[in-house]
Amino acid sequence: MPEVFELIMVLCFGVSWPVSIAKSWKCRTAKGKSPIFLVFIIIGYLSGIVWKLLSNNITYVFWFYVLNLLMVTVDFCLYFRNVRLDRNAAKPA
């Protein structure tokens, strides 16, 4: 039963990442995005994955941690793309 609650937690956090990725892709700017926040989220998901591995508690929930980590990593990469786009847009023509 505790796995169900853990799954609900991970799913609730995970719902926001596709929205964030879409926004990062469409808006093409890094303004309003915090790379430090993303790093802390990545560390959190990595910690959850390591805990699952060390405790030998690899269930279906483990794969949601991995999926969320991948989505946050994509958003983090888009941040750097958008920083570059912001820099290029700020250059005088």
Image (tube, rainbow, N blue to C red):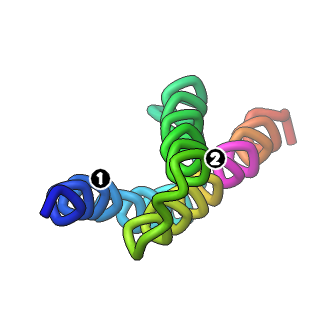
Name the residue that disc number 2 marks.
Answer: 76
Q: Residue at x 55, y 38 (%)?
A: 47
Look at 29% across and 53% down and name the residue there.
Answer: 13
Q: Nearer the viewer, residue 68 or 25?
A: 68
Q: Residue at x 24, y 62 (%)?
A: 3
Main SS class of the magenta portion in the image: helix
Amino acid type, label 1: Phe
In front: 66, or 82?
66
Residue pictured at 51% horizontal, 48% vertical: 55
Give the vertical position of 76 relative to 60 (above or below).
above
**Snapshot quadrant of residue 74:** bottom right
**40 up-or-down from 24: above or below:** above
Give, as a single range, the part of the protein colored magenta.
76-82
Expressed as whole percent of the image width and height from the top left, the position of residue 59 reads 42, 71
Residue at far bottom of view: 60
Q: Which mark is residue 13?
A: 1
Look at the numbered disc 2 and give the secondary structure of its residue.
helix
Residue 34 in the image: above or below residue 56: above
Few, some or many residues within 10 Å of mark 2 (<14, 14–19, 20+): many
Q: Does 68 sit left or right of 13 as displayed?
A: right
Q: Amino acid at mark 2?
A: Phe
Residue 79 is covered by the magenta coloring:
yes
Q: Position of residue 2 (x, y in %)?
A: 17, 56
Residue at the top extreme, as displayed:
36
